[in-house]
Image (tube, rainbow, N blue to C red):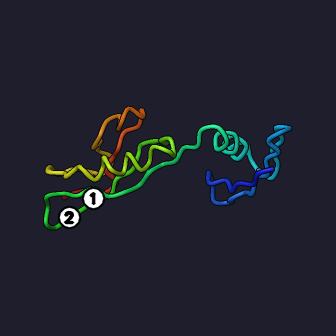
Amino acid sequence: MKQITCITCPIGCRITIDIINDIYSGNKCQKGLEFAKTELTAPKRTLTSTVRTIFQEFPVVSVRTKGEVPKERIPEIMRELGKITISQKMSIGDTLVTNILNTGCDIIVTSSLW
């Protein structure tokens, strides 16, 4: 038996998983069931962070993944983001990095630099 807390919505269901018999209980919706199954086989997360800029008025800008990336790749992605310094004005939703580290996920800016 394994217990996890679903993070797909604010309810935060505690899902109990009987791995041997493939039985899931405690989820209040289908998203919870899908989350639990993914969490056991290939956990993924949305990553939020900041990236340096050259602008004195905005020394850093917030960024996030446009989707979910494999959880085990997060430290590697964070190291890659640490190498970036933004030198041009960007707006909310602009793509900073396309397909970061071949994860199939873009990094987008979540605040404006102007």
Q: Quadrant of the C terminus?
A: bottom left
For the image shown, how many numbered marks are present on the structure?
2
Question: At 58% across and 43% down in the image, what residue appears?
Answer: 43
| In the depicted structure, whether residue 104 falls above or below residue 4 | above
Bin the neighbour count of mark 1 within 10 Å (Cα to Cα): few under 14, some 14-19, many 20 and up.
some
Residue 100 location, x and y as percent? 35, 38
Residue at image position (46%, 41%) is: 67
Left or right for 91, reference 14? left
Residue at 38 percent across and 32 percent down: it is 102
In terms of depth relative to the viewer, which is nearer, 51 or 94? 51
Q: Position of residue 73 (x, y in %)?
A: 45, 43
Residue 63 image point, x, y percent: 34, 53
Residues at badges 2 and 1 in contact (C-beta under 8 Å)?
yes
Q: Secondary structure at mark 1?
A: strand
Question: Residue 112 or 4: which is nearer the viewer?
Answer: 4
Within 10 angstroms of label 2, few (less than 14), some, or many (20 or more) residues? few
Q: Position of residue 38 (x, y in %)?
A: 64, 39
CA gap between label 2 and label 1 equals 7 Å
Residue kind at label 1, given as amino acid type? Val
Q: Amino acid at mark 2?
A: Phe
Which residue bears the numbered disc 1? 61
Q: Is residue 18 above or below residue 82?
A: above
Task: Please name the residue that numbered disc 2 is placed on.
Answer: 58
User: Could you say whether the residue bearing mark 2 is in a helix, strand or loop?
Assistant: strand
Left or right side of 4 for 74: left
> Furthest residue to the right?
21
What's the mark number on residue 4?
Answer: none
Image-based side of 71 in relation to 36, left or right? left
Q: Residue furthest bottom?
A: 57
What residue appears at the point 35 percent right and 44 percent down from the top-left corner?
107
